[in-house]
Image: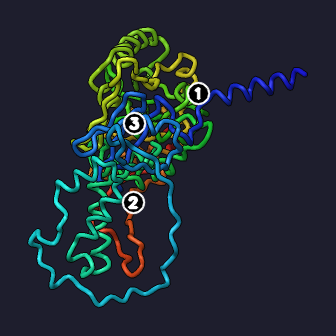
Amino acid sequence: MEFNKDQASVSENKSQDPNPRFAFEGCSVLLDVNDGDRLVFARLSGGAILKIGNKNYSLKPLIGAPFGSLFQVENGEEGSFLSRILPVKQENNSNNVIDDSRDNRELVDNNEAQSLTGEEIEAMRREGAKGDEIIEALIANSKTFDKKFQFSQEKYKLKKQKKYAPKLLLRRPFARSICEAYFKKYPSRIGFIRVDALSLLLTMANVTAYSDVLVVDMVGGLVTGAVAERLGGTGYVCNAYKGKYPYSVEMVRMFNFSDKVIERIVQSSISELSSPASSEENNQQEVVYNAEININEPSTSDMVVEEISVTAEATVVGAVAPECKIIKAPKAGAKASKEAIQMWRENGFSSLIIAAQDQDPWSVAKDVLPLLSYSAPFAIYHQYLQPLATCMHNLQQEKMAINLQITEPWLREYQVLPSRSHPHMQMSSFGGYVLSGIRISTTS
């Protein structure tokens, strides 16, 4: 009977945890507007709104919806609102060969092809016409639509859909989606780390369950969050830093980690991890004071996380209604305990990842590499090749590591459509470089 009680209590606790497949109130979401035209990070609440075009739309319909849901702007009696739409199965016409003799050479763009005026369109909106109905009316009143080539017709529909019936895709923030969103709009904030370079860092460092990973993260917490996501609440990820103040890891909030995973994300200064036990008290007092400044007090970075947008024009506002409260995610990066620091001093970390875009790789590596256990792998990222080449040469001269190699990842996306499959016209030329190796003992 006791076993049944314990089992019931476990099931009750599990039922209280939010389902990670569904968007819940207070969670972070990635909003994809019009198929990647705008990417916005937002924290869901009853009063959060998103501005699309000239109008504000409440994000309340997104609460409880599964990630991957598609929403469309619709008109109602109380105005425009976001409504979830279900995907419609389309017939597979990939085997049909497109044979269209029409082209666009005889079309003249003189703004006289559309007979439907703007006043008539606004009247349709006031009467409650949906976006799809307005698009069909525009097609019916266009003098040149039937003369256009098939691909031009699709582009015309897509252009009008983005204007009169914009769509919103609800995406779950995780390592890949966050990295892709920042790399597309603001790559400098993450040190120009592309998603393939991020995955290569985790692979070369052999980040697996129950690992104790030492991270020097100066890219806003992207690497820290990716490591914690892979650990899944096992092991530890220790964010090491030079000087008195820890590096910001505010991006970890977007991952929607549970308390179990947050507890496994700690921070400590490099001097404390490498210093003898006699100076432990002084270092602890200094680091705790700095942790209180960066964690407990509100800062400008906190506001960025709550209202962060990957596009400069998009804004997400929380707490519109007085009764709605802004739900903040728990902060990661607490001070590492004395027992954990002592254990890492004796046994060392199982792997190391360095992503310090503003620091010389060798100046960081020579301080943190001795903190690794022998035969432990490490991976160092940098945007440019020369600093990693210098670091690799110094590691060879000091005989600190073996199996050293510099890798340049390459990712190429393709558009795969009937009769028009080709690489994307706009893609990044490079995603940085990764230096990897294995630490060895320098004693003879």
Residue at mark 2: 409
Residue at mark 1: 260
Q: Which residue is drawn at 34% across and 59% down?
A: 133
Residue at mark 3: 59
**Which mark is nearer the camera, 3 or 1?**
3
Residue 36 rendering spot, x and y as whole percentages: 33, 54
Residue 228 rendering spot, x and y as whole percentages: 52, 36
Q: What residue type is labelled 2?
A: Pro
**Which mark is nearer the camera, 1 or 2?**
1
Q: Local crowd at mark 3 within 10 Å, few (<14), some, or many (≥20)?
A: many
Residue 392 rendering spot, x and y as whole percentages: 36, 50
Q: Which amino acid does label 1 sit on?
A: Lys
Measure the C-alpha gap from mark 3 to mark 1: 28 Å
> In the picture, which quadrant includes the N terminus?
top right
Left or right of 307: which side holds 210?
right
Return the disc, 1 or 2, that comes first in the chain's sequence: 1
The answer to whether residue 139 is seen in the rendering is yes
The answer to whether residue 379 is seen in the rendering is no
Return the disc, 2 or 3, that comes first in the chain's sequence: 3
Front residue (pair 280, 316): 316
Q: Are dots 3 and 1 in contact, CB under 8 Å? A: no
- SS at mark 2 in the image: loop
**Which mark is nearer the camera, 2 or 3?**
3
**413 above or below 76?**
below
Q: Which residue is drawn at 58% across and 32% down?
A: 18
